[in-house]
Amino acid sequence: MRNLAIISIFGFFSGVVLRSFFVFNFEFTFLIFAVAFALGLIFWCGVDFGFILIQTAIFLVALGLGVLRYEIQDNTEYISEFKTKIGQNMEISGMVIEDPQKLDKFTRAVFRKDKIKILLTLPHYPEVNYGDNLTILGKLEEPENFSDFDWKNYLAKDDIYFEMFLPKIITKESGDGSGIKRFLFSVKHKFLDNLSRVLPEPHRSFLAGVTIGERTSLPDEIEEDFRNIGVIHLVVLSGYNISIVSENTIKILSYLPVAKTIRALIATAGVILFAIMTGGSATVVRAAIMGVLILWARETGKIYQALSALIFAAFLMALVNPKIIRFDASFQLSFLATAGLIFVSPRIEKYFSWFPNFWKLRENLISTLSTQIFVLPLLIYLGGNFSWRTIPANLLILSAMPVTMFFGFLTGLAGFASHYLSWVLAWPAYWLLAYELWVVKIFS
């Protein structure tokens, strides 16, 4: 049964990947299912090699389903009316459906009218927020690729096929959308405000990135330093950060005098809400799914298999949005990095038994080497580069990251109760951040 499940998932992934590169007509997909049906009939007749036939039939059915799922996601007939209006000024009413992203010079917001999504580039003021109903006037445009980045397909994976640059906001009404998401985003913004009151830049932006994935205000030159030495994953909310949040949530809840199932439910809800609050990127969702599986395995006494969890997480994400497999680099890098930890770490650990493990230096060295081995080919393909500085920089920064996140969360949360308490807790966070930024500066 396990083998059949693996064959099914592999077939589904194969269908999605195949369809992402080639366009098939309905007849081809029908042929796949017809061949699978024929093989099933032969198996039913009881031939000697029937088990091989049924495996092939299951693979082909899953392959066809993968092709169909991608075809459904890629259906763009509903945008045909709007395509005729590209290049024209138009007035349109709709809602902001995601938490706007504040960049250095402008704000990006995803705006939806019925099923049509438009990426708006807006000035910082007047502010727009999730759930705002807007009437805007602007020029409808089609996204264009950058010289080294497929921006058009990157947006298309989220069903965004249009852009508007600096449209005029005619009317704005707040308070629509999901009440839970509005509450979570307001908590996030208040948390960021608390950090801003007690920490200077770039420390505040760095801490906002490692705690809740908000890195938009990090100065360009510092972000470039992070990128050059291969530690940009520390600035965004990665699986490493989510795992720390998940682990500490479990530890805190273990002290509650309630049943294990109740603790697991509370922790699961916490991880899911945290993932929603931080924006729910592919990396965060993958880590959240695996974190939840770890949590339930521990609470129920089951054996946790990391590879099975990784494949299951990838399958769920591809089922919801199959385009991420080809067009979401963060998903690809996150998947490969986790696979590197699973396959490489246990095999090279014995060669580093001589390395000191205080402050988890040995553990961080092994994890850094393991992930780099797997992600390096993709990084080079995406136009990145590998530097020897990546390993020592990761080693020195990762060792301090759990403590940094701990004091960072305490600083932001304390700000809800007392500015002075937040200010006191900010000092250890500040010095840890200063040390990490110093490491980045030295190796850049």
Image (spheres, grey):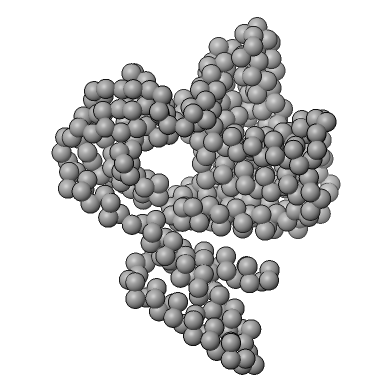
Q: Report the residue at 40% width, 50% height from top.
A: 157
Q: Is residue 339 above or below residue 268?
A: below
Q: Report the residue at 60% width, 71% height from top.
A: 7
Residue 148 seen in this snapshot? no
Q: Report the residue at 30% width, 27% height from top.
A: 134
Q: Quarter-wise, where is residue 130 in the image? A: top left
Query: Relative to residue 378, is residue 96 drawn left or right?
Result: left
Q: Quadrant of the N terminus?
A: bottom right
Q: Is residue 34 above or below residue 398?
A: below
How many dots with numbers? 0
Query: Relative to residue 337, is residue 279 drawn left or right?
Result: left
Query: Relative to residue 351, is residue 293 drawn left or right?
Result: left
> In the image, residue 388 lies at what x, y percent?
61, 44
> In the image, residue 363 lies at what x, y percent?
76, 43
* In the foreground, 441 or 62: 62
Residue 403 seen in this snapshot? yes
> In the image, residue 382 lies at what x, y percent?
45, 51
* In the foreground, 40 or 400: 40
> In the image, residue 407 lies at what x, y percent?
69, 22
Q: Report the residue at 55% width, 54% height from top.
A: 316
Q: Quadrant of the C terminus?
A: top right
Q: Quarter-wise, where is residue 233 in the image? A: top right
Residue positioned most to the top: 420
